[in-house]
Amino acid sequence: CIGGRHDRGVRPEPRCRRRHRAPCGTCMTGDAPIVTAVIPLFNGERFLRAAVASIAREAHGRVRAVVVDDGSTDSSPALLQALATEHAWIAPIRHGANRGVAAARNSGIAAAETPFIAFLDQDDAWAEGKLDRQLAVLAAERDLDFVVGRQLFNIEPDMPRPAWVKERYLDGPQPGYV
Protein backbone atom coordinates (compact mmCIF):
# COMPACT_ATOMS: atom_id res chain seq x y z
CA CYS A 1 0.00 0.00 0.00
CA ILE A 2 1.20 3.47 -0.81
CA GLY A 3 1.00 6.45 1.55
CA GLY A 4 2.38 9.88 0.78
CA ARG A 5 3.31 13.10 2.47
CA HIS A 6 2.39 16.64 1.49
CA ASP A 7 4.85 19.53 1.60
CA ARG A 8 3.13 20.98 4.66
CA GLY A 9 3.66 17.82 6.70
CA VAL A 10 0.02 16.74 6.52
CA ARG A 11 -0.21 13.07 5.79
CA PRO A 12 -3.14 11.91 3.66
CA GLU A 13 -5.03 8.75 4.46
CA PRO A 14 -2.85 5.90 3.16
CA ARG A 15 -4.36 4.07 0.23
CA CYS A 16 -3.57 0.80 -1.44
CA ARG A 17 -3.04 0.48 -5.17
CA ARG A 18 -6.66 -0.62 -5.45
CA ARG A 19 -7.79 2.61 -3.75
CA HIS A 20 -8.85 0.82 -0.55
CA ARG A 21 -7.87 2.11 2.87
CA ALA A 22 -4.47 0.65 3.56
CA PRO A 23 -3.96 -2.05 4.52
CA CYS A 24 -7.59 -2.78 4.01
CA GLY A 25 -9.55 -5.92 4.73
CA THR A 26 -10.29 -6.44 1.05
CA CYS A 27 -6.59 -6.48 0.20
CA MET A 28 -5.64 -8.68 3.15
CA THR A 29 -8.22 -11.38 2.41
CA GLY A 30 -9.44 -13.14 -0.69
CA ASP A 31 -7.82 -15.21 -3.39
CA ALA A 32 -5.90 -12.55 -5.30
CA PRO A 33 -2.18 -12.04 -4.65
CA ILE A 34 -1.51 -9.10 -2.33
CA VAL A 35 2.30 -8.97 -2.53
CA THR A 36 4.59 -8.66 -5.53
CA ALA A 37 8.08 -9.95 -4.84
CA VAL A 38 10.53 -8.11 -7.10
CA ILE A 39 13.70 -10.09 -7.87
CA PRO A 40 16.44 -8.46 -9.96
CA LEU A 41 18.46 -11.15 -11.76
CA PHE A 42 21.87 -10.93 -13.39
CA ASN A 43 23.88 -14.11 -14.02
CA GLY A 44 22.27 -15.63 -10.94
CA GLU A 45 21.42 -19.08 -12.22
CA ARG A 46 23.01 -20.85 -9.26
CA PHE A 47 20.89 -18.87 -6.77
CA LEU A 48 17.54 -18.30 -8.45
CA ARG A 49 15.92 -21.66 -7.70
CA ALA A 50 16.52 -21.24 -3.92
CA ALA A 51 15.19 -17.65 -3.95
CA VAL A 52 12.02 -18.76 -5.75
CA ALA A 53 11.62 -21.75 -3.40
CA SER A 54 11.75 -19.43 -0.38
CA ILE A 55 8.88 -17.40 -1.85
CA ALA A 56 6.89 -20.53 -2.72
CA ARG A 57 7.21 -21.70 0.89
CA GLU A 58 5.63 -18.44 2.10
CA ALA A 59 3.29 -17.57 -0.75
CA HIS A 60 0.08 -19.59 -0.16
CA GLY A 61 -1.40 -17.87 -3.22
CA ARG A 62 -0.74 -14.39 -1.84
CA VAL A 63 2.45 -13.61 -3.78
CA ARG A 64 3.21 -12.84 -7.38
CA ALA A 65 6.92 -12.72 -8.24
CA VAL A 66 8.28 -10.42 -10.93
CA VAL A 67 11.76 -11.59 -11.84
CA VAL A 68 13.63 -9.07 -13.96
CA ASP A 69 16.51 -10.58 -15.90
CA ASP A 70 18.89 -7.68 -16.43
CA GLY A 71 20.73 -8.92 -19.52
CA SER A 72 22.20 -12.13 -18.08
CA THR A 73 24.82 -13.87 -20.19
CA ASP A 74 24.68 -17.23 -18.40
CA SER A 75 21.74 -19.65 -18.52
CA SER A 76 19.64 -17.56 -16.09
CA PRO A 77 17.11 -16.61 -18.81
CA ALA A 78 16.41 -20.28 -19.62
CA LEU A 79 16.05 -21.17 -15.94
CA LEU A 80 13.76 -18.18 -15.37
CA GLN A 81 11.54 -19.27 -18.27
CA ALA A 82 11.42 -22.83 -16.92
CA LEU A 83 10.48 -21.58 -13.44
CA ALA A 84 7.81 -19.28 -14.91
CA THR A 85 6.37 -22.24 -16.82
CA GLU A 86 6.39 -24.34 -13.64
CA HIS A 87 4.93 -21.58 -11.41
CA ALA A 88 2.15 -19.44 -12.86
CA TRP A 89 2.76 -16.81 -10.16
CA ILE A 90 6.17 -15.92 -11.65
CA ALA A 91 6.18 -13.14 -14.24
CA PRO A 92 9.49 -12.87 -16.11
CA ILE A 93 10.74 -9.60 -17.57
CA ARG A 94 13.89 -9.40 -19.69
CA HIS A 95 16.12 -6.40 -20.23
CA GLY A 96 18.02 -6.81 -23.50
CA ALA A 97 21.18 -5.38 -21.96
CA ASN A 98 22.45 -4.97 -18.41
CA ARG A 99 21.04 -1.71 -17.04
CA GLY A 100 21.86 -2.25 -13.36
CA VAL A 101 20.06 -3.48 -10.30
CA ALA A 102 18.15 -0.21 -9.75
CA ALA A 103 16.69 -0.34 -13.26
CA ALA A 104 15.74 -3.98 -12.74
CA ARG A 105 13.98 -3.17 -9.46
CA ASN A 106 12.19 -0.23 -11.06
CA SER A 107 10.97 -2.46 -13.92
CA GLY A 108 9.66 -4.93 -11.33
CA ILE A 109 7.90 -2.19 -9.38
CA ALA A 110 6.30 -0.88 -12.58
CA ALA A 111 4.97 -4.37 -13.34
CA ALA A 112 3.52 -4.87 -9.84
CA GLU A 113 -0.26 -5.22 -9.70
CA THR A 114 -0.64 -5.84 -5.98
CA PRO A 115 -1.11 -3.49 -3.02
CA PHE A 116 2.24 -4.48 -1.45
CA ILE A 117 5.75 -4.83 -2.87
CA ALA A 118 8.58 -6.88 -1.35
CA PHE A 119 12.17 -7.14 -2.52
CA LEU A 120 14.34 -10.22 -2.73
CA ASP A 121 17.80 -10.31 -4.28
CA GLN A 122 18.67 -13.31 -6.45
CA ASP A 123 21.15 -14.68 -3.93
CA ASP A 124 18.91 -14.27 -0.88
CA ALA A 125 15.99 -16.21 0.59
CA TRP A 126 12.99 -15.22 2.65
CA ALA A 127 13.04 -16.52 6.21
CA GLU A 128 10.24 -18.85 7.17
CA GLY A 129 7.24 -16.86 8.39
CA LYS A 130 8.59 -13.52 7.08
CA LEU A 131 5.57 -12.68 4.98
CA ASP A 132 3.01 -13.60 7.65
CA ARG A 133 4.82 -11.50 10.27
CA GLN A 134 5.18 -8.46 8.02
CA LEU A 135 1.60 -8.57 6.77
CA ALA A 136 0.35 -8.90 10.38
CA VAL A 137 2.30 -5.77 11.37
CA LEU A 138 0.93 -3.84 8.39
CA ALA A 139 -2.63 -4.91 9.25
CA ALA A 140 -2.24 -4.00 12.93
CA GLU A 141 -0.40 -0.71 12.42
CA ARG A 142 -2.43 0.98 9.71
CA ASP A 143 -0.30 4.14 9.63
CA LEU A 144 2.87 2.33 8.53
CA ASP A 145 4.14 2.78 5.00
CA PHE A 146 6.65 -0.08 5.09
CA VAL A 147 8.07 -2.84 7.26
CA VAL A 148 11.70 -3.94 7.43
CA GLY A 149 12.74 -7.33 8.78
CA ARG A 150 15.91 -8.67 10.29
CA GLN A 151 18.56 -10.19 8.03
CA LEU A 152 20.86 -13.15 8.43
CA PHE A 153 24.17 -13.27 6.59
CA ASN A 154 25.43 -16.60 5.24
CA ILE A 155 28.73 -16.86 3.43
CA GLU A 156 29.15 -19.85 1.14
CA PRO A 157 31.68 -22.42 2.33
CA ASP A 158 35.19 -21.82 0.96
CA MET A 159 34.29 -18.24 0.02
CA PRO A 160 36.08 -15.28 1.60
CA ARG A 161 34.01 -12.85 3.66
CA PRO A 162 33.40 -9.72 1.54
CA ALA A 163 35.08 -6.64 3.01
CA TRP A 164 31.76 -4.88 3.58
CA VAL A 165 30.46 -7.78 5.73
CA LYS A 166 31.64 -7.08 9.25
CA GLU A 167 32.62 -10.14 11.31
CA ARG A 168 29.82 -9.39 13.80
CA TYR A 169 27.24 -9.70 10.98
CA LEU A 170 27.87 -13.44 10.98
CA ASP A 171 26.94 -13.81 14.68
CA GLY A 172 23.18 -14.00 14.05
CA PRO A 173 20.24 -11.98 12.77
CA GLN A 174 21.00 -8.30 12.21
CA PRO A 175 18.63 -5.33 11.97
CA GLY A 176 17.29 -4.73 8.48
CA TYR A 177 17.72 -1.47 6.62
CA VAL A 178 15.97 0.65 4.02
Image (cartoon, rainbow, N blue to C red):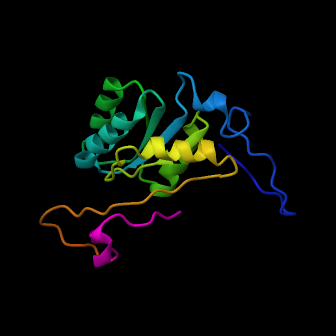
Residue closer to the observer: 142 or 49: 142
Indicate the position of residue 164 as horizontal and vertical percent values: 35, 76
Instruction: Identify the main secondary structure in magenta.
Output: loop
Residue 146, placed above or below residue 33: below
Q: Residue at x 69, y 32 (%)?
A: 18
Magenta residue check for 171? yes
Left or right: where 14 falls relative to 76: right
Q: Position of residue 162 (x, y in %)?
A: 27, 73
The reply, left or right, for residue 111 in relation to residue 7 is left
Find the residue positioned furthest to the left: 158
**Which residue shows up at 55% across the image and 53% down it?**
147
Residue 108 in sight from this viewpoint: no
Q: Is residue 122 above or below residue 78?
A: below
Q: Which residues are magenta?
A: 164-178
Q: Residue farthest to the top?
A: 31
Which residue shows up at 79% across the image and 46% down it? Answer: 13
